[in-house]
Image (cartoon, coloured by chain):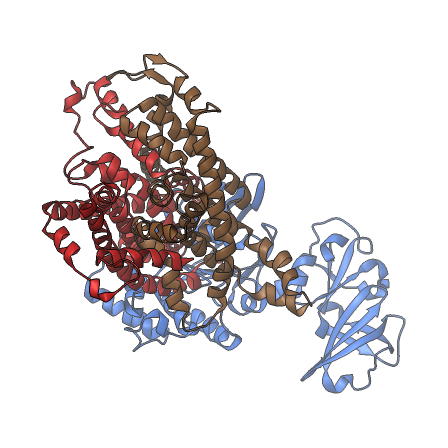
Chain colours: A brown, B blue, C red
Amino acid sequence: MNRETYGLLLKLALVILVTLLLLPFVPLVIWSFAARWAWPDLIPSLLSARSWSLVLDPEGDFLKGYLESCLTAFGAMTASILLIYPLARWLTLSDSRFKPAIEILAFAPLLISPYVAAMGMHEIFVRLQLEDTGLSAILAHTVVFSPYMLRVLIVGFLAKGERLEQQAQTLGGGSLFVLWRVTLPRMKPAIGLGCSFVFLASMGEYVLTNLVASEIITLPAVLYPYVAAGDRSVAAAGSLLLMSASIVLLILLELLLHNKLITRDAA
Amino acid sequence: MNSSQPRLAVQNIGKSYGKVEVLAPTSFSINSGEILAILGPSGCGKTTLLSIISGLIQPSAGDVYLDGRPLTGLPTERRGIPMVFQDHLLFPGMSVFDNVAFGLMARKCNKVEIKQRVEEVLVAVQLQGLEHRQPAELSGGQKQRVALARAIVLRPSVLLLDEPFSNLDEALRLEMRELVMESRASFGFSAIIVTHDSREALAMADRIAVMRKGKIEQLDVPSTIYFKPATTFAARFLGHSNLLSCQHLAPELLKNVAISNPTQQSLPGSQGYLCIRPENITILTEDQTANCLQAVVKTLSFSGPRVNVCLNSAAGIIRCELATQNAAALNSGQTVGLVWDSSAASIIHGNDQEVS
Amino acid sequence: MSLLFWGGIFVVFMRSLGMTPPYAFADATLRFYETVSRDESFAASFVLTARVAAMSSLAAGLLGSMIALLASLSTRSGWGIRLVLNLPLFTPYIVAAQAIVLLLSQSGLLSRIFYGTGILSDMMEFPTLFYDELGLGASLGLAFKETPFVALMVFPYFLASHRTYGSVAKTLGVGLWLRLVKIYLPAAMPAIAISVLICFTYGFTAFEVPRMLGRTYPQVLSSWSYDLYMGSDPEGRSLAPAIGMVIVSVNAISAYVFFCIFRRLHKRLAITRAGSLA
């Protein structure tokens, strides 16, 4: 086997595997426009915009849920960055002997059931008289998803090192100046990545919100009954609406990063 | 095999990424047992050239021939041309023995032969007794020895070395150079070594190719490269040669000076440069004749047995090097006369941009 | 912030012991654990949860590693692949479950394609993947989300070892198979193990996907616990925290293994970094 065919075979295998992962989105798109699509037709026998007009109805539940989801996700994202940035900085710089313990405590939500924690958090919120408020939803999401932010920021700090900050300080830069002019610009890709992780995870969360704030009807909560009832067309359109945020954010992120950070970060 | 046939021939190899040409079509060949150094600054395309020979990069054009057979389309692992990299890149989790034996294993040699050949080559690189060490337990020099052993245990006809010693300190580098020369004597391979260190190239190579911006500017034996650089760039790269614009020199100073690149048809005195090495200039403090170049001493710097003198002249800044005892009479600001032996100088055609 | 998380876990723990604030140890009882463990649906539910988590994480580990390996071997930077993989990775669970049903159920797109090409003559010939006893559907749904995660986690390790040690091995005449076994896989193994373990944890705690793609009996632990917790039966409500603590205990065991591997991975990474080509 010569070099070209060998390379081509590898590429082909890769394309097939990745296509398999993208295949589920195909029926999702078709269904969102289908009014009638009986088995075994390959294309719907009747197309309609009914589902989309229901989903995109300005007075409808879907857009209200979408707004609710975005607000919660935005809140969780903002809270995460404000809380996690100093923690990540401390964890990369400190030699404290409590560091490993704090790391384990902080990363735990990645490895321990958020559902169980939400059960308990609900009781805490009840005691604090915060139950079923937007704040409790934001808090719960922040708690569960901020470890993504922590991980990405720590990797970012480690990759960038301390040298440039030290140089800026020796040249007489005050700590706020150094933060604003040196550290933040360099951490922009990592912050962008961390924010998108938190935002996207929060957008898609259902059970957590349902447990701690059942009054807050986010988009997944609006969507769930349609999926459960098997209204495929509306469920598909609603799903695509929910995904639209992810897609927009991914494109924004790609523009921001210019493909600079991902390899290093994932490592 | 035809005795006149080169061991490895590179014919019109070029490489472009989109519109960016990193390697202009290049041809050269090396003979059996010869060491060729490719010398140039970083980013000049020398590593690209080496990677193309090894098959790690596909050329945009041209062919590589090993003993007359074209290597085009052959994957790297079937070319039989091992390469030693700048980083030792010893396989983690494998002992010294396993590292050296890895290539033989891939060739499905039997265990007895592998053991015997690995031991033989470990003796040659002076690592006997360290077979069972892990890479992390070795010093920098030892790691690079293993990397070298790993390549020569395959008894290659051609060995590629990509800046192999640049991560080592000066003393180790000298040792490694000698080791490569010795192994060539005992194992009989040809080698192409890529380096940015002119001393390394001069010390090791039978021939040197000076590369710049994807082109070979001069390919010749070390003494010619050193004393008669063909381009102003080669002159600069092989150590601070003085390049003096011929326009500002008295005709007597240029008399009998050989022209390095006579193929270019332009007259000295217009676009030529006189190339003279710092150690070949004599400073006259008295008896200044008309046939010397007037210059003012700017700085004197002491470096043990030698003193480096920097002077200002009508032809530009000149650097001289003289024995410390001869510099006692010099002071900065002093006007002196400079003369040189015409046989130690040469004239290079070129334009101003290349000099600066 | 993590105080709130741990506080939540603590409250559930106390609840599972039958204690409510103000906590008094006199009230502590193991009664709920006893009830749960006696319940015959507990064993079924536990086995199902573990099976779903294991099947999905192993499938994701295998597929994700294959994608990462192929991408590292056949692309320059894997940039396009990484971009594409982000799509299923960031798809919400609820959407992923919906999409995979529309593709792979008996009346899904694939079954239609098979009928159209004559492979099937009836809808019923297409295997029932969803709402099954074995949790196959739930595993498929989870694997769909987890595969890109594994691929993205593992890819840099394959790429780094391919670019560095792989190049050396090639020039030494080592073919793809031996390089794969001796160089690429050992370099990526800790990362693969870690990713699979994270996927196992996700699978074990997953709620939406198994709930939407699985049967109503047996349910996975979190879904069962949720039903009890949200239900009207006060006795059932008090069992939910005990089931929750079972989930957390399994999580804790995986977390311990995770940190053990993680430490080794860091060592390996340091070596790979030092050895990578400039």
Position of residue C148 relative to residue B149, above or below, is: above
Describe residue C168's horizontal placement relative to residue A37 as left or right.
right
Describe residue B295's horizontal placement relative to residue A10 as left or right.
right
Image location of residue B153, percent across then percent down:
32, 64
Q: Is residue B259 visible?
A: yes
Image location of residue A32, percent across then percent down:
37, 22
Looking at the picture, tell me which residue is in the foreground, C6 or C148.
C6
The residue at 57%/55% (across/down) is A186
Looking at the picture, tell me which residue is in the foreground, C10 or C184.
C10
Image location of residue B258, percent across then percent down:
73, 61
The residue at 44%/25% (across/down) is A60
Disc count in the image?
A: 0
Q: Quadrant of residue B261?
A: bottom right
Image location of residue A257, percent across then percent down:
53, 46
Position of residue B258 relative to residue A202, above or below, is: below
Q: Quadrant of residue B330?
A: bottom right
Looking at the picture, tell me which residue is in the foreground, A213 or C155.
A213
Looking at the picture, tell me which residue is in the foreground, A143 or A254.
A143
Q: Is residue B292 visible?
A: no
Describe residue A144's horizontal placement relative to residue B132 as left or right.
right
State the quadrant of the C terminus of chain B.
bottom right
